[in-house]
Image: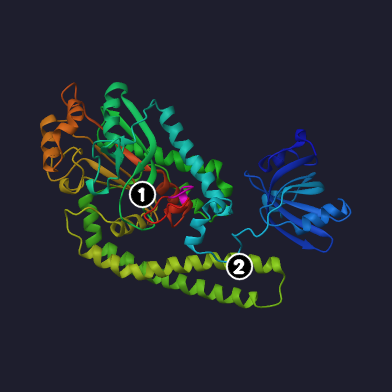
């Protein structure tokens, strides 16, 4: 085996009929008489490798037969097309070399709890679903950068250590900075506003931190966010910008990651519908939907569908358990075990939604104008649409001090949230910024903040203030929506949560 003929699995279509070498890890294997079926992964995909006794030395055949999951190896052979094989190609092995054998790999086809998988996150990344989600995340990030770079935006890196509050004061992470208390950034927005006055159109892209004591599937304490900021723009212009960004992300993922989307069961037709225009509601209209017959009828219909889905899943689990107890081969048992893991996870999710349905209905019926929309409220609104939904003009008291008060209605601000469809909730939040010095100063004082800390920020309103605005898109929430992943913790390689910081 030589390096000169080494190829990656995602290049096999270019090497049919040729002898090549694959370097990778043993993902799965099974023996059938004098034939071994090895599934090799190399980071770009999976390939079935067929090893026939007599085509390789006997000692190599026996070594491969005993090889444990995730052993590293190199295999050489001829590539042939076979639509029945994973990836559509397979390798007829003529030689192999074990690089490092592995025994007792802990992540097996049997069910594993969340705590176990989080503790073994360094290995869990190798699992097919996590691998596919990671590939989608890479595309999402690249699509974001390309969208802004191709549309005349300048990247500006904003600080992680900060003295100012951008969002809720109660969710600040305090750190000791050489004896001086500082905070980890919640947003790069305020710094970015100053850069927008220099370059016109800018964006920052990096980690942000929120000390929210929440353990819901939508929350992380450390997550990645992209934030554009634009001078001379109004609310309608921001909506068009956000609409274009999200549409371009969906299109890129469909183009580059269709096979990964299929592998994890994402809703590809739903992603194909992500094209402008998106639905637009005011906050007041959203409240009317929540309190009116539309939400009530929708939730009643959803409850019936969920109960039917629960019955279907339970029936399938019963069928598989009976089949598993019969006389079947080990590879069939492994396949059934993997499906049962998925089904039991789906059943847990359906049970949770059935339990929450009446709670959501009550919260919606009792919603009062003036409160911020909660997670259940966003879920209802987004589930009622098959494309992202803009909700604009929230009550002034419910939003941050920097948001511009609507001059036509002083009770609301010129802001928006974008809610992803299918109940995934907010993926973007943004606003036009308050550009009037006196109004901004009053808002800073009203929220109990020290104006001296914001001297430089107020300066932007003294020296050539202009209408401007921007928004923040959360990468992990966007990836969760695109992949239909229920838990945001699966959408970042090494999640940070209240009780999850081991690795």
Residue 337: numbered disc:
2
Which residue lies at the image location 20% right of the left edge and 37% below the top edge?
A: 402
Residue range in magenta is 491-495
Q: Is residue 239 visible?
A: no
Residue 494 lies in the magenta stretch: yes
Residue 243: numbered disc:
none
Residue 50 pos. (x, y %): 78, 53
Residue 434 lies in quadrant: top left
Which residue lies at the image location 51% right of the left edge and 43% below the top edge?
A: 253
**Prevailing secondary structure of the magenta residues:** loop
Residue 110 lies in quadrant: bottom right
| Sequence-earlier tag: 1 or 2 | 1
Residue 221: numbered disc:
1
Element type at mark 1: loop
170 relative to 217 in the view: left or right: left
Q: CA gap, disc 1 to disc 2?
A: 33 Å
Residue 253 lies in the magenta stretch: no
């Amino acid at each position: 085996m030589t390096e000169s003929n080494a190829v990656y699995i995602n290049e096999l279509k270019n090497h049919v009929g040729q002898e090549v070498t694959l370097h990778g890890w043993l993902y799965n294997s099974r023996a059938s008489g004098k034939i071994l079926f090895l599934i090799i992964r190399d980071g770009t995909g999976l390939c079935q490798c067929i090893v026939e006794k007599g085509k390789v030395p006997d000692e190599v055949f026996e070594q491969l037969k005993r090889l444990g999951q995730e052993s590293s190896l190199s295999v050489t052979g001829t590539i042939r097309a076979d639509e029945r094989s994973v990836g559509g190609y397979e390798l007829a092995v003529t030689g192999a070399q074990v690089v490092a054998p592995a025994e007792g790999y802990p992540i097996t086809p049997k069910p594993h709890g969340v705590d176990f998988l989080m503790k073994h996150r360094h290995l869990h990344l190798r699992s097919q679903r996590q691998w596919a989600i990671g590939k989608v995340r890479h595309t999402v990030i690249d699509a974001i950068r390309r969208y802004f770079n191709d549309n005349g935006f300048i990247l500006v890196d904003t600080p992680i250590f900060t003295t100012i509050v951008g969002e809720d004061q109660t969710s600040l992470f305090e750190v000791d900075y050489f004896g001086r208390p500082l905070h980890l950034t919640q947003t790069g927005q305020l710094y970015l506003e100053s850069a927008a006055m220099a370059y016109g159109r800018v964006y920052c892209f990096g980690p942000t931190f929120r000390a929210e004591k929440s353990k819901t599937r939508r929350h992380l304490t450390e997550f990645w966010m992209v934030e554009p900021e634009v001078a001379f723009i109004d609310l309608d212009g921001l909506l068009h910008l956000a609409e274009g960004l999200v549409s371009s992300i969906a299109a890129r993922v469909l183009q580059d990651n269709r096979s990964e989307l299929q592998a994890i069961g994402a809703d590809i037709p739903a992603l194909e519908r992500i094209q402008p225009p998106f639905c637009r509601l005011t906050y007041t209209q959203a409240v009317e939907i929540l309190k009116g017959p539309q939400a009530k009828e929708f939730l009643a219909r959803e409850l019936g569908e969920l109960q039917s889905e629960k019955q279907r899943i339970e029936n399938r689990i019963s069928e598989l358990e009976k089949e598993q107890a019969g006389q079947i081969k080990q590879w069939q048992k492994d396949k059934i075990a993997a499906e049962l893991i998925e089904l039991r996870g789906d059943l847990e999710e359906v049970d949770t939604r059935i339990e929450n349905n009446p709670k959501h209905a009550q919260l919606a019926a009792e919603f009062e104008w003036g409160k911020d929309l909660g997670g259940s409220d966003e879920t209802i609104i987004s589930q009622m649409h098959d494309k992202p939904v803009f909700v604009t003009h929230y009550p002034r008291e419910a939003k941050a001090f920097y948001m511009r008060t609507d001059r036509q209605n002083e009770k609301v601000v010129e802001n928006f949230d974008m809610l992803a469809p299918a109940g995934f909730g907010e993926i973007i939040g943004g606003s036009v910024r308050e550009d009037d010095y006196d109004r901004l100063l009053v808002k800073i004082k009203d929220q109990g903040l020290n104006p001296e800390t914001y001297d430089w920020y107020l300066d932007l309103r003294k020296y050539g203030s202009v209408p401007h605005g921007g928004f923040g898109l959360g990468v992990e929430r966007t990836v969760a929506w695109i992949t239909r992943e229920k838990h945001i913790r699966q959408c970042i390689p090494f999640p940070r949560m209240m009780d999850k910081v081991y690795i």
